[in-house]
Image (spheres, helix red, strand yellow):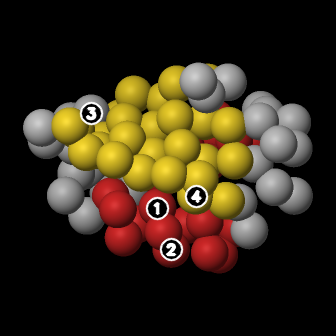
């Protein structure tokens, strides 16, 4: 279970990334955020976001049209 849930369903790029970035800013190193999104481009967006920020994309899954991303804060 993640430390914080960020519900971005119905939002399109770049809003899910911006909401995730804001949520991660409030976390301590090692804590996680689960981001829910329906934007089909979100998977590539979050992979790139984690590569560029150094945070860890722990897992991602899809249930119906909802994508779930678990991101661990790493500074």
User: Taking 2 as reference, is 16 left or right?
Assistant: left
Nearer-the-camera pick, 3 or 6: 3
**Could you tell me which quadrant the C terminus lies in?**
bottom right
What x and y, as percent, mark residue 41? 25, 64
Task: Say few, some or many: other residues with alpha carbon within 10 Å of mark 4 (under 14 / 14 to 19 / 20 or more).
Answer: some
As helix, strand or loop, the secondary structure at mark 1 comes to helix
Gap between marks 3 and 2 measured at Cα: 19 Å
Q: Which mark is residue 57?
A: 4
What x and y, as percent, mark residue 58? 59, 53
Mark 4 and mark 1 lie on one chain; the one further toward the N terminus is: 1
Task: Say few, some or many: other residues with alpha carbon within 10 Å of mark 3 (under 14 / 14 to 19 / 20 or more).
Answer: some
Q: Quadrant of residue 13?
A: bottom left
Mark 3, residue position: 9
For the residues bearing labels 2 and 1, Cβ distance under 8 angstroms: yes
Gap between marks 4 and 3 measured at Cα: 19 Å
Gap between marks 4 and 2 measured at Cα: 10 Å
User: Taking 45 as reference, is 62 left or right?
Assistant: left
**Could you tell me which quadrant the N terminus lies in?**
top right
Outermost residue on the left side: it is 64
As helix, strand or loop, the secondary structure at mark 3 comes to loop
For the residues bearing labels 4 and 1, Cβ distance under 8 angstroms: yes
- Can residue 20 be seen? yes
For the residues bearing labels 4 and 3, Cβ distance under 8 angstroms: no
Mark 1, residue position: 46
Mark 2, residue position: 48
Q: Is the residue 30 above or below the residue 49 in the image?
A: above
For the residues bearing labels 1 and 3, Cβ distance under 8 angstroms: no
């Amino acid at each position: 279970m993640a430390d914080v849930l960020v519900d971005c369903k119905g939002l399109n790029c770049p809003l899910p990334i911006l909401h995730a970035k804001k949520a991660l800013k409030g976390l301590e190193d090692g804590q996680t955020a689960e981001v829910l999104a329906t934007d089909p481009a979100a998977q590539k967006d979050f992979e790139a976001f984690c590569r560029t920020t150094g945070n860890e994309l722990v897992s991602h899954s899809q249930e119906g049209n909802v994508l779930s991303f678990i991101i661990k804060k790493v500074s």
